[in-house]
């Protein structure tokens, strides 16, 4: 009898665990230094025909100029504005009162990524973009030390500092960053081809590769290994902006939007990810607007460079579209949101931000 009761109890318990539904997959994505101004208003009227920043002004206007900001953003990022806006949430349009800000005061990349990935700013220690192994623990490392997610975490970044930001060595999280190629014995045909192609398509920069490589390395890994938590960090937008090339900056934003669509379409064809995956997309910092030339730059001296944005869609996200009511969110809330989505029993003390409330109508 005792045994029967025990079995019954175990059955009820296992049912409850199933009912908790700890099967959510997460894909975290960053677009380096893409301004909220372009995300919400498309091509900037002061820059799109500005000969100082655009070589082919006619071509760029033909591609991305429309009379209204809503039409401009749709033509710049069609997946975000035609598809994601119907199924997810887009935060950070300050003209409508939706604000998303960094809490670090550095307003450049490593501090931004540290804040997103660890849930806390660390201005005392993370104050440069130097290749220093992160002393803080990222959400990727936390997941990789949890039995349920061990070896089911992976990161892909266009910038060669990501192995340090994630602290690949300590965390054991594989990071394909910068100009790294795919490694291992069971490479897919596509991975072999990417490895072959990457050195033959020169990047304009010495520390950042073109995003298509980062993207397809990530997809191939997801197909093969079914990572439950995947981080993809695109980089082109920031570097083209630093170069003062507004034409390439816009084209890159457009291209990244297409990569996001490709990623989403892939997950909807793979039963492991289908209808089961939470997508969070954000940026590591903003850029300036005044004076005009500060669009190229960011950092503590650039007004507005701490202003960012967030896009969420997929598992557990209610379809609120573009947020048009006043709110104040912070980048520190992303890591706690992932902690909650992956069903960790408690949020680490180091994370001070509250998880985002995602399911409310
Ligand atoms: Zn930058």
Image (cartoon, rainbow, N blue to C red):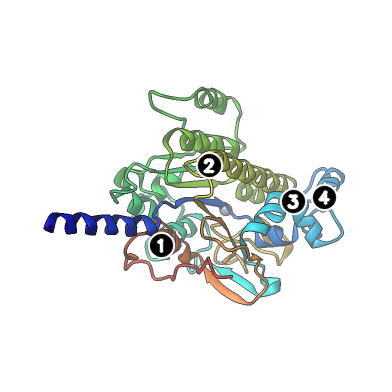
Residue 323 seen in the figure: yes
Q: Nearer the viewer, mark 4 or mark 1?
A: 1
Q: What residue does disc 3 label?
A: 76
Name which residue lies at 53% across and 50% down. 29
Say which of marks 4 and 3 sits in front: 3
Nearer the camera: disc 1 or disc 3? 1
The answer to whether 65 appears left or right of 94 in the picture is right
| Mark 1 nearby-residue class (10 Å; few <14, some 14–19, many ≥20) | some
Q: Determine the CA span between mark 4 and mark 3.
A: 20 Å
> Which residue, as the protein is rendered here, is positioned at the far front?
1
Q: Between marks 1 and 2, how big is the CA–CA gap?
A: 27 Å
Q: Position of residue 97 (x, y in %)?
A: 66, 75
Q: Position of residue 254 (x, y in %)?
A: 70, 46
Q: Which residue is mark 4?
A: 51
What's the residue at 70%, 64% (across, down)?
289
Q: How busy is the neighbourhood of tag 4: few (under 14 within 10 Å), some, or many (20 plus)?
A: few
């Amino acid at each position: 009898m005792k045994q029967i009761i025990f079995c019954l109890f175990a059955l009820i318990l296992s049912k409850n665990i199933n009912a908790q539904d700890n099967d959510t997959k997460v894909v975290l994505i960053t677009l380096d230094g893409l301004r909220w101004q372009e995300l919400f208003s498309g091509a900037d009227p002061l820059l799109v025909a500005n000969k100082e920043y655009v070589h082919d002004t006619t071509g760029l206007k033909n591609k991305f100029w429309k009379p209204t900001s809503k039409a401009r953003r749709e033509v710049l990022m069609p997946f975000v504005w035609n598809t994601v806006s119907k199924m997810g949430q887009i935060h950070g349009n300050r003209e409508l009162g939706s604000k998303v800000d960094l809490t670090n005061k550095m307003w450049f990349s490593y501090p931004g990524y540290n804040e997103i990935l660890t849930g806390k700013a660390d201005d005392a220690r993370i104050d440069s973009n130097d290749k220093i192994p992160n002393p803080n623990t990222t959400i990727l490392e936390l997941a990789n030390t949890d039995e349920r997610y061990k070896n089911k975490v992976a990161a892909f970044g266009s910038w060669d500092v990501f192995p340090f930001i994630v602290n690949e060595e300590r965390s054991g999280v594989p990071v394909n960053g910068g100009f790294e190629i795919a490694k291992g014995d069971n490479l897919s045909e596509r991975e072999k081809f990417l490895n072959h192609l990457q050195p033959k398509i020169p990047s304009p920069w010495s520390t950042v590769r073109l995003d298509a490589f980062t993207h397809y390395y990530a997809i191939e890994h997801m197909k093969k290994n079914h990572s439950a938590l995947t981080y993809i960090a695109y980089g082109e937008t920031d570097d083209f902006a630093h170069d003062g090339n507004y034409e390439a900056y816009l084209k890159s934003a457009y291209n990244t939007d297409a990569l996001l669509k490709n990623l989403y379409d892939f997950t909807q064809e793979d039963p492991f990810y289908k209808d089961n995956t939470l997508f969070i997309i954000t940026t590591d910092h903003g850029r300036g607007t005044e004076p005009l030339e500060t669009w190229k730059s960011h950092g503590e001296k650039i007004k507005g460079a701490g202003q960012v944005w967030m896009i969420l869609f997929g598992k557990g996200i209610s379809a609120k579209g573009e947020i048009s009511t006043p709110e104040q969110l912070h980048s520190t809330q992303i890591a706690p949101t992932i902690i909650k989505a992956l069903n960790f029993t408690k949020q680490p003390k180091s994370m001070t931000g509250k998880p985002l409330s995602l399911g409310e109508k």
